[in-house]
Amino acid sequence: MSVLVEIQAAADEALRAHAVPEPGSSRFEQMVEDPDRLFTLEAVYEGYLMHYGTPRAFTRMDEDLRLLAGDALYALGLARLATRGDVEAVTELSDLISLTAQAHAEGRPRDAEVLWRASAEALSASGGPGVRSAAEASPKGGSAP
């Protein structure tokens, strides 16, 4: 089962009504080996796409429902890691959510892509410095909340 299909199945019933029949492959499957971290990263990314892009796993929603669905997907993913006690990953993804929102609010959507890569690397087996380091290294230099 693909991780996007798993996310659809785990989503609230109201969201499952909007599930795409074949959502395709995940974005981070080749980067993040741990299945819980991958599920969470993909759920948070799908939530991000609900807010700022084109979702891959869900469709046919008005703007208000998309925003609520995005928040629900953020929570769905983070809850899985919180239950597992993976505080490091919860912190990384919480920072990612706020920093990508800030990038969009400040008209810097391209910066969000750098932040996504940094978080995926931080959540991988090889690790990485994480999203806070990437934000501090950006031209805006440490404007993280």
Image (tube, rainbow, N blue to C red):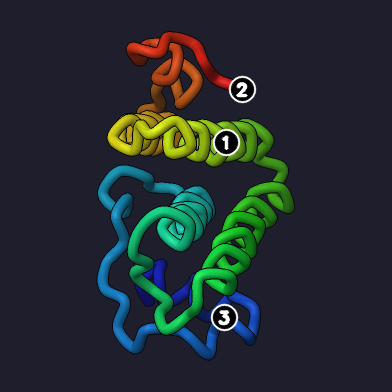
**Residues at discs 1 and 2 in contact (Cβ within 8 Å):** yes
Amino acid identity at mark 3: Leu
- Asked if the residues shown at circle 2 and circle 3 are in contact, with their CB atoms under 8 angstroms apart, the answer is no
Can I make out residue 41 in this image? Answer: yes
Q: Which disc number belongs to residue 69?
A: none
Q: Position of residue 59 (x, y in %)?
A: 40, 80
Q: Amino acid at mark 2?
A: Pro
Identify the residue at image location x=59%, y=55%. 74
Q: Position of residue 144 (x, y in %)?
A: 55, 20
Numbered mark located on residue 15 in the image: 3
Residue with the mark numbered 1:
98
Q: Nearer the viewer, residue 128 or 141?
A: 141
Residue bearing the label numbered 2: 145
Distance from the alpha carbon under mark 2 to that under mark 3: 30 Å
- Which numbered disc flags the more N-terminal residue, 2 or 3? 3
Q: Is residue 121 visible from the viewing direction of this image? A: no
Q: Of label 1 and label 2, which has the lower sequence position?
A: 1
Q: With 42 as the anchor, is 81 left or right in this view?
A: right
Q: Name the secondary structure under disc 2.
A: loop
Q: In the figure, is residue 131 to the left or right of 98?
A: left
| Residue 111 place in picture, x, y as percent | 33, 30
Q: CA distance from mark 1 to mark 2?
A: 7 Å
Label 1 element class: helix
Tell me if 33 is positioned left or right of 77 in this view. Answer: left
Q: Is residue 27 above or below residue 117?
A: below
Q: Quadrant of residue 3?
A: bottom left
What kind of element bears circle 3? helix
